[in-house]
Image: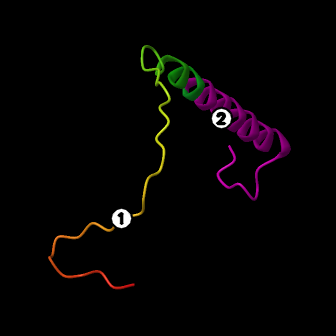
């Protein structure tokens, strides 16, 4: 049995790569399926807001000097 990554043979390295690849594909597939199911009934409508005059909002009665 290979107890160290440094002394492992080629097949052990290949097994590690294959397991990591399968796990990565599984996580990506789960994330894509979760994202596809999250959009059910939550569509947004775009509203256009036109900019008006610039203004400053403060909580004090002091004059704004720029």
1 or 2: tag closer to the N-terminus:
2
Q: How many marks?
A: 2
Name the foreground residue: 23 vs 53: 53
Dot 2 lies on which element? helix
**The magenta stretch spans residue 34:** no
Secondary structure mostly taken by the magenta-highlighted segment of the chain = helix
Image position, residue 52 (x, y; %): 44, 53
User: Left of 42 or right of it: where is 20?
Assistant: right
> Vertically, is 48 above or below 29?
below
Disc 1 versus disc 2: nearer the observer: 1
Dot 1 lies on which element? loop
Q: Residue furthest top?
A: 41
On residue 24, the disc is: 2
How is the rendered protein coloured?
rainbow
* Mark 1–mark 2 distance (CA, rounded to whole Å): 51 Å
The part of the chain drawn in magenta is 1-30
Image position, residue 58 (x, y; %): 23, 70
Name the residue tied to disc 1.
Answer: 55
The residue that appears at 42% across and 20% down in the rendered structure is 42
The residue that appears at 53% across and 25% down in the rendered structure is 35
Looking at the rendering, which quadrant does residue 1 occupy? top right
Looking at the rendering, which quadrant does residue 56 occupy? bottom left
User: Left of 36 or right of it: where is 60?
Assistant: left
Image position, residue 43 (x, y; %): 47, 20
The residue that appears at 42% across and 14% down in the rendered structure is 41
> Vertically, is 25 above or below 51?
above
Looking at the rendering, which quadrant does residue 66 occupy? bottom left
């Amino acid at each position: 049995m290979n107890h160290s990554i440094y002394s492992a043979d080629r097949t052990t390295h290949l097994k590690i790569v294959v397991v990591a690849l399968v796990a990565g594909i599984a996580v990506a597939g789960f994330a894509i399926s979760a994202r596809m199911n999250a959009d059910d009934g939550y569509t947004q409508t775009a509203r256009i807001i036109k900019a008006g005059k610039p203004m400053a909002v403060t909580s004090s009665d002091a004059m704004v000097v720029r």
